[in-house]
Image (cartoon, grey):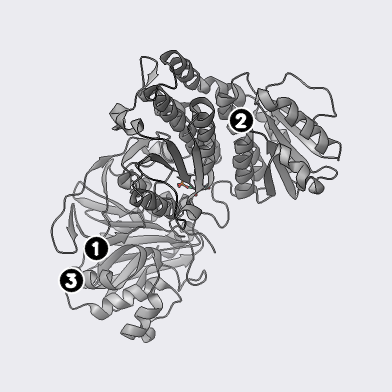
């Protein structure tokens, strides 16, 4: 199933809306899409322009639109229900109602039957069914109509709605799918994420689920389904618009790889006091750790791989059992966790539905939930008992890089504090640990100097149908992340393997020139990994060795070498991560692919 994540923007105020909407959709392009559209509403009614293809084509199609309209909605669509066609693109209009939607309406077929909507429909989308339902229910009171419709709809939705006889006003309501809103200088704006808002204001609020917004020029009313007015918490963006622009880099991904030293500094340094980890300011008191006997880590994709790295520190240094769970698996289990289990949830976006539902299950089991999230005020952050925000700044590229390394750093901070509180780590050991963590920026900066060597690796593997990553211990978890990075942006099939496991079958796939990227930073298993490397080398593999070694001339070991600055393997993960991110980046770029927006993928997966 295609993973989707649409972009939403709505604006009403004292400025012509057309270009505000289209510029906003351009800010949201990174989310991935296949069509785009806008609807503007003025005294003459509703005008819609929508096209498959890029926002640039929409801009052209909207050239004739009335410049004097001051209220409208815009949408970038990544198809789920119905193909990529102009008719299926949003906005969808039915009678007096026009709307845009991000999410999946699970009972749209039942609604068609129950309300006889079939003859009102021209597209194949679930979204148009909601427009038809609203128009069928509409009796002149938008709030009353939306309340009724929300009661009938099941599924995830972020809806922006306009009624033809209410010019200048946008209504909005959400369940699960994210939306943020703001009012400023006599205007109001709503969007699927803050990158579309930040050119206008840094103060915004997260739209509460199942609350209806009435968005007017410069004012937004928020009310619950019983009509009670609610004042949502106003949040402040802690980064500026340049963070959400490429700043001279060819792709966001490369920029975000190079931003890692600063992202790590912003995440770690505010949590260090007198050389020791300090989490009180984040609302994470030592009492949280006191009764904890084991830890469950829950996440998806790269976030899960970061959790796997954190596991090594908790287990190896603190002897605390850690269970890393794939969120989409965990949420359908009857997990063996309770109040003595600390659940750590990792999510860059804070909106991943599998991770969110897994979090909810952990809470139902009585486990305290501490989440590590990069987006302030996101759903996962708001539903957690405790939150340790990472300060990586907006991560625009679909392939997660800086979010991964700051998540590892956050896990390390928590582990170190946990060890101190439990008396497992002495102050002296904690100081040494934190000092090394504060020093990882130099490891990364040193590693970035190998970019040209890494580019050579990419040029070599870009033609290969299969690439293998192998490692042991913490390096095996890095292999998993490396393989995902390569697959998701270069479309080359790749597998990560525990080096010692290869000989139990998969080595049958190793033949002449098959690239094997071996990671060997853990000293206690280094010789074993080198033996495994020699096994694949002797079968014709093209071996790239990523290690601390000085120059290796022995061609029975490797064909290429990427040398990491000397460091304890617990901390060299940050340098290794950069190498593996760059291998994927340069391979994708060499293949002429869209590195930031790979096919089939979206930045935040809010569907199951
Ligand atoms: C990573 O490169 C991918 N984009 C993907 O695996 C991502 O890490 C995963 O979807 C989890 O997203 P989250 O961190 O926003 O929850």
Q: Nearer the viewer, mark 3 or mark 1?
A: 3
Can residue 118 be seen here? The reply is yes
Labels 2, 1: front one? 2
Secondary structure found at label 2:
helix
Q: Vertically, is 401 above or below 74? A: above
Mark 3 near mark 1, Cβ–Cβ under 8 Å? no
Q: Crowding near pointer 1: few (<14 within 10 Å), some, many (20+)?
A: many
Identify which residue, 515 or 311, lies in the foreground.
311
Q: Is residue 454 above or below residue 21?
A: above
Give the mark nearest the N terminus, 3 or 2: 3
Q: Which mark identifies residue 144? A: 3
Q: How much space separates mark 3 and mark 2, taking CA atoms?
A: 56 Å
Q: Is residue 393 left or right of residue 477?
A: left
What residue is disc 2 on? 576
Mark 3 vs 1, N-terminal side: 3
Q: Residue at x 22, y 43 (%)?
A: 234
Residue that label 1 marks: 171
Q: For the point 16% across and 53% down, which residue is it?
A: 230
Q: What's the distance in space between the residues labelled 2 and 1, CA to CA?
A: 48 Å
Number of labelled discs?
Answer: 3
Question: Could you say which is closer to the camera, residue 527 or residue 129?
Answer: 527
Q: Position of residue 368 (x, y in %)?
A: 34, 42
User: Alpha carbon of mark 3 to alpha carbon of mark 1: how far?
Assistant: 12 Å
For the residue pair 188 and 18, the one nearer the viewer reads as 188
> Which badge, 2 or 1, is on the more N-terminal residue?
1
Q: Residue at x 32, y 28 (%)?
A: 286
Q: Horizontally, is 269 left or right of 485 in the view?
A: left
Quadrant (top left/top right/bottom left/bottom right) for the N terminus: bottom right
- Name the front one of labels 3 and 2: 2
């Amino acid at each position: 199933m295609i993973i989707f994540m649409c972009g939403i923007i709505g604006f009403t105020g004292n400025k012509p809306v057309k270009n505000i909407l289209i510029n906003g959709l351009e800010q949201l392009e990174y989310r991935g899409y296949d069509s785009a559209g806008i609807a503007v509403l003025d005294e003459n009614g509703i005008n819609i322009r929508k096209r498959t293809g890029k926002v640039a084509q929409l801009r052209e199609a909207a050239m004739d639109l009335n410049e004097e309209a001051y209220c409208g909605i815009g949408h970038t669509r990544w198809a789920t229900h119905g193909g990529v066609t102009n008719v299926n693109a949003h906005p969808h209009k039915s009678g007096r109602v026009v709307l845009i939607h991000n999410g999946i309406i699970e009972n749209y077929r039942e609604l068609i039957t129950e309300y006889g909507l079939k003859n009102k429909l021209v597209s194949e989308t679930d979204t148009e069914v909601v427009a038809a339902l609203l128009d069928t229910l509409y009796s002149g009171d938008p709030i009353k109509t939306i309340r009724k419709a929300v009661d009938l709809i099941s599924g995830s939705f972020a809806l922006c709605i306009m009624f033809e006889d209410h010019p200048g006003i946008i209504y909005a309501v959400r369940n699960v799918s994210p939306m943020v809103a703001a009012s400023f200088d006599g205007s109001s704006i709503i969007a699927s994420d803050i990158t579309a808002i930040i050119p206008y204001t840094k103060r915004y609020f997260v739209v509460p689920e199942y609350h209806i917004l009435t968005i007017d020029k410069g004012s937004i009313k928020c009310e619950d389904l019983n009509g009670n007015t609610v004042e949502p918490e106003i949040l402040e963006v802690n980064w500026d618009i340049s963070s959400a622009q490429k700043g001279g880099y060819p792709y966001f991904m490369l920029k975000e790889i190079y931003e890692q030293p600063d992202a790590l500094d912003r995440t770690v340094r505010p949590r260090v006091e007198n050389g020791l980890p300090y989490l009180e300011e984040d609302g994470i008191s030592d009492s949280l750790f006191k009764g904890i006997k084991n830890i469950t880590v829950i996440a998806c994709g790269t976030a899960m791989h970061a959790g796997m790295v954190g596991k090594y520190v908790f287990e190896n240094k603190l002897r605390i059992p850690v269970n890393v769970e794939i969120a989409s698996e965990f949420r359908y289990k009857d997990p063996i966790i309770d109040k003595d289990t600390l659940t750590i949830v990792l999510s860059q976006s804070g909106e991943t539905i599998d991770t969110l539902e897994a979090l909810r299950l952990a809470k139902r089991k009585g486990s305290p939930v501490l989440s590590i999230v990069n987006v302030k005020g996101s759903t996962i952050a708001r539903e957690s008992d405790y939150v340790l925000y990472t300060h990586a700044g907006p991560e625009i590229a679909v392939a997660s890089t800086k979010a991964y390394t700051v998540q590892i750093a956050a896990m390390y901070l928590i582990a170190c504090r946990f060890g101190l509180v439990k008396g497992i780590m002495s102050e002296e050991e904690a100081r040494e640990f934190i000092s090394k963590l504060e020093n990882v920026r130099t490891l990364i900066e040193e590693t970035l100097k190998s970019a040209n060597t890494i580019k050579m690796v990419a040029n070599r593997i870009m033609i290969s149908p299969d690439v293998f990553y192998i490692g042991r211990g913490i390096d095996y978890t890095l292999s998993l992340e490396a393989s995902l990075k390569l697959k998701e942006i270069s479309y080359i099939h790749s597998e990560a393997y525990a080096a010692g496991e290869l000989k139990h079958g998969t080595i049958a796939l190793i033949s002449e020139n098959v690239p094997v990227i071996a990671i060997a930073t853990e000293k206690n298993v280094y010789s074993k990994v080198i033996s495994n490397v020699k096994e694949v080398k002797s079968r014709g593999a093209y071996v790239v060795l990523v290690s601390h070694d000085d120059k290796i001339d022995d061609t029975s070991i490797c064909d290429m070498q990427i040398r990491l600055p000397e460091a304890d393997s617990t901390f060299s993960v940050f340098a290794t991560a950069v190498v593996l991110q760059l291998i994927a980046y340069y391979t994708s770029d060499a293949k002429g692919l869209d590195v930031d927006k790979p096919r089939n993928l979206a930045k935040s997966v809010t569907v199951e």
